[in-house]
């Protein structure tokens, strides 16, 4: 009897979605111009990225001047760990496509629609000091310590970010600050030679596993430890983490994710 291979990591398209959701910093590159930071960036399920740039920037003027054809563009996003690590960058994403201006009469409505599910204080600047652009994506590349991989627009449209994406930062911070014993137990799954003399931190948690950052003397290493099965909810994620850690007590993820007052 043939058994399907167990999925042990997110797909490349899922990684792109999650890294874009985590990214606090992004810059837009247009032909002949210096990159301009974006204050808001949201990868939508329809396959485009909505982003805000300064209204008086040269980039905004160039895109508006291109009319319906738009301008070729690349958006670079940086996914940083929510911890004080030696090197905080977890992944870089490059979205390549065509930047288009959002009509003035649609700016506030689109900002309001974004704020419904993704509230961001800088959305209040839309129409005043900032303007919205759309990047119609042709392809995406995500790179981390394991290498780089690319996906196309259709693969992005079919993917979703990790279901625990919005909660991950709080969990990682809580593990680091309040559960070093759990991190130590997870670290015992690493080769002894890799652990010797190194500082080890929780770097990422998703439905497929945990990633540890090993800060060795000569270099950093990111090591993924997969769960036996993907987690579908917070309780199953908690059980999977405790199973990896060999933790003798039983508790829900709320015990990991809740900080002490």
Image (cartoon, grey):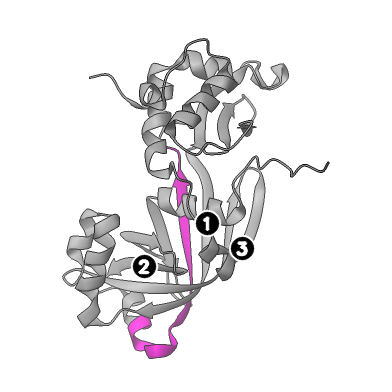
Task: Tell me what residue is drawn at x 41 percent, y 26 percent.
Answer: 253
Q: Can residue 198 be seen in this view?
A: no
Is 107 on the left-hand or right-hand side of 90? left
Residue at the disc numbered 3: 151
Residue 16 on the magenta segment: no
- Say whether disc 3 or disc 2 marks the residue closer to the N-terminus: 2
- Going from N to C along the chain, the mark reached first, 1 or 2, is 2
- How far separated are the C-alphas under marks 1 and 3? 11 Å
Residue 106 image position (x, y, % from top left): 24, 78
Q: Residue furthest right?
A: 1
Badge 3 marks a residue whose secondary structure is: strand
Marks 1 and 2, Cα distance to the nearest angstrom? 15 Å
- The span picked out in magenta is 62-81
Residue at 51%, 66% (x, y): give it: 157
Q: Residue 248 carries which label?
A: none
Q: Mark 1 points at which residue?
A: 93
x and y percentages locating residue 67 in the rendered image: 37, 89
The residue singled out by tag 2 in the image is 50
Residue 245 image offset from top left, x and y in percent: 56, 18
């Amino acid at each position: 009897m043939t058994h399907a291979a167990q999925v042990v990591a997110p797909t490349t398209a899922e990684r792109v979605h999650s890294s874009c959701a985590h990214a606090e910093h992004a810059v837009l590159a247009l032909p002949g111009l210096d990159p301009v930071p974006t204050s808001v960036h949201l990868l939508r399920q329809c396959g485009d990225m909505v982003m805000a740039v300064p209204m008086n920037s040269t980039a905004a003027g160039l895109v508006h001047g291109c009319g319906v054809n738009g301008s070729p563009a690349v958006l670079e996003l940086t996914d940083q760990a929510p911890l004080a690590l030696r090197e905080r960058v977890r992944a870089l994403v490059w979205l390549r496509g065509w930047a288009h201006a959002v009509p003035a009469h649609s700016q506030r409505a689109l900002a309001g629609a974004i704020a419904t599910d993704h509230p961001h204080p800088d959305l209040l600047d839309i129409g005043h000091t900032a303007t919205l652009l759309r990047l119609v994506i042709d392809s995406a590349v995500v790179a981390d310590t394991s290498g780089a991989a690319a996906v196309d627009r259709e693969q992005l449209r079919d993917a979703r970010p990790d279901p625990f994406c919005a909660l991950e930062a709080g969990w990682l911070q809580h593990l680091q600050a309040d559960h070093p014993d759990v991190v130590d137990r997870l670290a015992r799954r690493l080769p002894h030679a890799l652990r010797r003399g190194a500082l080890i931190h929780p770097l990422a948690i998703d439905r497929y596993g945990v990633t540890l950052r090993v800060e060795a003397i000569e270099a950093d290493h990111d090591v993924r430890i997969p769960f036996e099965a993907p987690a579908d909810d917070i309780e199953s994620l908690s059980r999977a983490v405790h199973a990896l850690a060999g933790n003798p007590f039983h508790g829900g993820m709320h015990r990991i994710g809740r900080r002490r007052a």
